[in-house]
Amino acid sequence: MRLRRLAAAILPVALALAWTAPVQAHCDTLDGPVVSAARKALDTGNVNLVLVWVQKNDEAELRSAFQKARSVRQAGGEAKDLADLYFFETLVRVHRAGEGAPYTGLKPAGDIELPVAAADKAIETGKLQGLAKVIFERTEKGLHGHFDQVMAKKKYNPNDVEAGRAYSGAYVEFVHYAERLYGAAETMAPEHVQKAPAAAVHTH
């Protein structure tokens, strides 16, 4: 019963972690949603498929890059491949800039972390259970790990300064971990999806 109550309390916060930094990393892979949208846009001639991935004030740049790529790829062969790559890189760069993240190049296909793969699967199937399990298990493990460290060092001899420092260090790590989980829940709000500011962490 206690575990169920703990799960109910933590799960909303844990799920929020699925929509933060790992998603940004996923969006620069060659099999990620951004590049996949770029492929479809170039093949169909529908630029709207990629405009949804950038800010409104970046539309002009994307439209221009799209037209250039579409024009060059008509030559076929290597020219087509280079035009596609140019557009992929432009789109991902602009998309990440809109998130406040640096562009570090396109990543190979398959370079996807577990929670992101689970998030994609949830969207594909319309079922959240698999993602919830992945995130909750990771979060619960982290909470127990930090908590156990604090409790193991809590009853120290007041005259043993080194033991006291070990406790205070474990305490700070535990509390900061809890703060990060709590702060991550705020990123579930739609207005935080683009250009999300880093969660403030209090000092102790």
Image: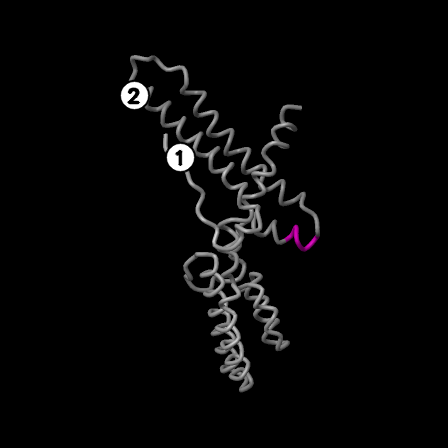
User: Tag 1 or tag 2, which sits nearer the N-term?
Assistant: 2
x, y percent for residue 136: 59, 37
Left or right: 146, with 16 as reference point: left
x, y percent for residue 3: 63, 27
Screen quadrant of the N terminus: top right
Residue furthest to the right: 126
Q: Quadrant of residue 100?
A: bottom left
Residue at x 49%, y 76% (from the top left corner): 65
x, y percent for residue 5: 64, 27
Res 202 label: 1
x, y percent for residue 111: 51, 57
Left or right: 167, with 7 as reference point: left
Q: Residue 196 or 136: which is nearer the viewer?
A: 196
Magenta segment boundaries in residue numbering: 121-125
Screen quadrant of the C terminus: top left
Identified by mark 2, the residue type is Glu
Q: Is residue 111 above or below residue 58?
A: above
Crowding near pointer 1: few (<14 within 10 Å), some, many (20+)? few
Res 162 label: 2
Residue at x 53%, y 76% (from the top left corner): 66
Identified by mark 1, the residue type is His
Q: Main secondary structure of the magenta part?
A: helix
Tell me, yes or no, whether the highlighted magenta stretch contains residue 132: no
Residue at x 66%, y 50% (from the top left corner): 122
Q: Is residue 53 above or below residue 163?
A: below
Crowding near pointer 2: few (<14 within 10 Å), some, many (20+)? few
